[in-house]
Image: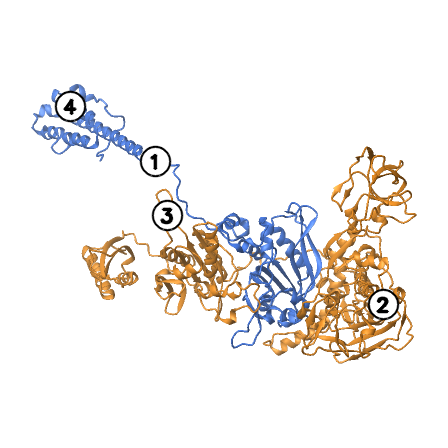
Amino acid sequence: MMKGRSRWGGPFVLTNATDEMSDDLQTLRQETEAALAEAGDVRAWDAVRVATLGKSGRLTGLLKELGKTPPEERRARGAALNALRDELSEAIEARGRALETAALEARLAAERVDVTLPVTEAPRGLIHPISRAAEEIVAIFATMGFSVAEGPDIETDWHNFGALNIPAHHPARADHDTFYLPPSPGLDVPRVLRTHTSPVQVRAMRTETPPIRIIVPGRTYRADHDATHSPMFHQCEGLVIGRDIHMGHLKGCLIDFLRAFFALPELPVRFRASYFPFTEPSMEIDIGCDRRTGILGEGSDWLEVLGSGMVHPRVLANAGLDPAEWQGFAFGMGIERLAMLKACIADLRAMYESDLRWLRHYGTSPLTPTILHEGV
Amino acid sequence: MKFTLSWLRTHLDTDASLDTITRTLSAIGLEVESVSNPADRIRGFRTARIAEAVQHPNADRLRVCTVETGAEAPVQVVCGAPNARTGLHVIFAAPGTYIPGSDITIKAGEIRGVTSAGMLCSLRELGLGEEHDGIAELPEGTPVGADYAAFAHLDDPLIEIAVTPDRGDALSVRGVARDLAAAGLGRLKPWLHDTVEGRFDSPIEWANDYAEAAPWVLGRTIRGVRNGPSPKWLADRLISVGLRPISALVDVTNFFTLDLGRPLHVFDADRIAGGVLTLRPARTGESLAALNGQSYTLDAADCVIADASGVQSLAGVMGGSASGASETTSSVFIECALFDPIIVARTGRRHQIHSDARARFERGIDPALLPSALEAATAMIVDLCGGEASEVVSAGEMPAWQREATLRFRRLAELGGLAVDPDRAVARLEDLGFEVAAREEDSVRVHVPSWRNDVAIPLALEQDPTLDVTIAQRAATSVPAIEAECDLIEEVLRLGGLDAIPPVSLAPDSPIPARAFTPKQTRTAIARRALASSGLVETVGFSFLARDIAARFGATPDALRLLNPIATDLDQMRPTPLATLVGVAQRNAARGISPVAIFEIGGGFSEDGEQAIAAGLRWGMTPRGFGQPSRAPSWSEAKADLYGLLAALGVPLDALNITTDAPGHYHPGQSGVVRQGPKTVLGRFGALHPAVLAASGIEGAAVGFELFLDAIAEPKRRRKAAPELSSFQPLTRDFAFVVARDVSADAVLRAARGAERNLITAVRLFDVYEGSHVAEGHKSLAIEVTLQPKDRSLTDTEIEAASSKIVAAVAKATGAVLR
């Protein structure tokens, strides 16, 4: 829309030539300026521009006639005409800019909206607290060199019990409240829903060559259903096998984990002797808390959070590792329990109830970091 | 296992505080479940004496008592009990004392114009009994001003511990005391017991036809007994741990069960027919009316004790009521037996009987204790009930329980992480009853005590049958010695407390840890975040559900039906998590929560095995918003969810094709199966079948998808070519094709895309029209084709040629004509 280049300086600058301007040029100047002032929109403005500077514009016409001017006048006339052309071009451009600004302002004013109008937000999805806790557990153990192993939910009786030194009719078996399935067609192998993630220990020892460091988050099942037991729940198993892994490593590893998971560098951790068929020595692990307030790391009470121990020589041998050569530790924790403690969730059953109001309250954004340096 | 501090002290010489005892118990593996003191409920009650009781001036039934309470001046108390009399020793509650039996706190006050500064109490008011004939009468000579709870021996903390399945020996007060002594909390008192000489041959003998279940049994008859209530000390002991005293004969057996972990049974000898008690397997159809009032139909694997008239006892589990000792019993036969732990456990479990005897036999009792325990029990019965004892009769013999174990001291540090001083380690073992057989500089060999059924037990391994034989044998050969050594290490370490072991951080093999996830696990993690990012909320549901619900979503083979479901609506392994999500949607809808947009990643089960499935579901009208009307979910959103997920997982979408053979839980006309190549099914999507929704109690439309995470191919590790980034403007051309209605849009798009592969970079469908401007049975598909010149601008002729190719290709593939 704007053509030619404007000069430095503002519009309507009077040049030296003005004094020598002839009457016809004075008239042209005055009339053009008046027409410009009158032009209220871009169309009217463009008409003035064309009528003045266009191919058959008045000033263009005068410039064309300059050749016909007697040579003695030509120089002065030429200078005056050029000066006038410059002056009018400048004026036209300036007027054009002003009109454009005004038009834009008018448009902006017309386009004003009520920005307090509510907008439709994209629905927010969330990660379940159990998944979140499992991701955090894995993230922490991953920095200690663990990798994630998995196994089937439907296990053979041998993987779930026999290999783990829980022979048939062992009292520990009764404690497990096992769900049984018919043998799979064609194979006469008793099947159970795994009662713990420990069978994956056996699978790892069968398929991997030590040293082994694995962590096994997964679904587990026991026929127990009340306020604090769910027939399906999640465990996270850990297994470390090496030539010189001892109970000090077990303690260090789990203390480091618990303090990182709860983000409490001074969290008190207590180890109590206990019994599990698949570990020896065995221990249960408590963390310090105030039972009255539920605050971890304070008070003088203890909460059991983990079971662990040195892998039983029978378990090693059942899976084909020579206990004279290999040793290590294993541990298991309830993911729900850790999630509930960390997020102050009171009711286990709500985890599986899938009430969207509950999930929105306790769920985690998918963009929350799952790597340690960004914070878990 | 419950015991009181005073009972513990009959075996343990200790000055340790209750707190130290309970902390130590937990630390050494006898986890304390609760500690309570009955005296806590009756704090503030004191012994007192009524110095003088006179008639209340204004009330016939009241007395004004001057009570000596141990304070300097006597206290005046108004009392309504008829037995309040001068000189009586009583229980006094000063103002401010809480009365548990009537749930009030005593205040000083005036009763009918006479001040009363306290209360004289009945046992019922203390919560200690039901009698309420008047105030409690304490014996003559009771000291005045003593704490009543202490005076009545009620200030005796009750400790309950959880005993792990390996520690049968700790199911006895003596066993607990032994552990505490070994942990340094005092000295185990010697166990002294009397012996009773047999005066006659026992008229009842043993016969053993089931030696596997009962390797060794002892017994003897005591005649001329007089059964009756137990003396106070014995009754109090049983009451203190929550047992009801029954009669002296029965209470003696219960006492030894708890005190020594040695279950005993007494038969009324006069009710045993035929003079022989036979141990044998139960016979088909036999039953027993047991002491708990229940009747049990027995199994051939049960071991019973029978006389000529039938079964009299379920061995090691519970006696029968017919031959049990009663008030009139004058002659008893004491059974002191060793029963097989597994057979007892099976019988107990089969009949759901949880008895103190079973708990001990199934963990294993001390086989060497039988003779002395029988002597001790005989002595106590003769002491309490009189009578004379017969010779001991027996069947079988003491099994060889002797075992040895060796500890190499360096293993305490190598396995246990703590270098315990060898002398100290040996001392701890000796305190537990291990006897040193040979001591070397670097190791010790010990005899295992008879009561430790958890140490150095030879058991068959359950090795993986697919193991290489050499490997399996080498591993198996190492087990016995190493296991026994582990047992000893555990004993030494637990007694010193595991907190003494210094923690050592587990350093990773490399300062930069290797990846923890397999590619498949990474996919699952990405899928979870991608679905949540697209607005779906993650749920976690049970892997099993009601069979009829499961059947709506796939096959429900019997092989995937739980044999013992916890509830009938949780009996079938689900074919897909989508089945669970439909239930979730219904539950939320029933609570007025709408819309529902959810997903679950979990197992789907079929006869082919388990597969990881990411499933999502949308139900309910979207909320009305400014500029956005409410709408129901459409099949296309489920497809967008699935395709978005596939894209997030790096699956090239162009290479996929869709077939319309989705399973029956989808709407047959609004669903598809996404395939990669002819064999691989990646997922399926669509509107859910209205009949399935109706059966699930869901109103309105719902759409969903399933993605089979295992079907996604591993990403290939190959060098990616650099992208061709043309500097020439792409141009677009629009085409409208008329095709028969059943021609798929996919066919048209595919044909157009393939018409000029070097030039066409994108083909987009932007309109579908059916109606008056198109012939009946036809539809118009409008597409936009993007042409991307590579090294120079296209001429009009070239563009024209490309357009012709597109039209021809689409026409050939679909019969389309340009509109």
Callout 1 and callout 3 share a chain: no
Question: Residue placed farthest to the top in the image?
Answer: A19
Write down the quadrant of residue B683 in the picture: bottom left
The answer to which of marks 1 and 4 sits earlier in the sequence is 4
Indicate the secondary structure of the residue bearing disc 2: helix
Which label sits on residue B494? none
Residue drawn at (65%, 69%), measured in percent from left and top? A166
Q: Which percent across, then down, holds residue B15?
A: 84, 52
Measured Cα–Cα span from mark 2 to mark 4: 137 Å
Nearer to us of marks 4 and 3 is 3
Residue B630, label in figure: 3
> What residue does disc 1 label?
A113
Q: Check residue B377 in the rendering and tell me which mark sits there, or answer none.
A: 2
Q: Amino acid at mark 1?
A: Val
The answer to whether marks 2 and 4 sit on the same chain is no
The span from disc 4 to disc 3 (Cα, nearest Å) is 62 Å
Q: Are marks 2 and 3 in contact (CB under 8 Å)?
A: no
Residues under labels 1 and 3: Cα distance?
23 Å
Query: Which residue appears at 81% of the width and 43% of the height?
Result: B44
Q: Amino acid at mark 2?
A: Ala
The residue that disc 4 covers is A31
Query: Which label sits in the foreground, 1 or 4?
Result: 1
Mark 3 falls on what kind of element? loop
Distance of mark 1 from mark 4, alpha carbons? Answer: 42 Å
Mark 1, secondary structure of its residue: loop
Q: Earlier in the sequence, mark 2 or mark 3?
A: 2
Q: Chain of mark 1?
A: A
Q: Is residue B422 visible?
A: no
Instruction: Write down which chain is painted blue.
Output: A
Tell which subunit mark 3 falls on. Answer: B
Callouts 2 and 3 on one subunit: yes
The orange one among the chains is B
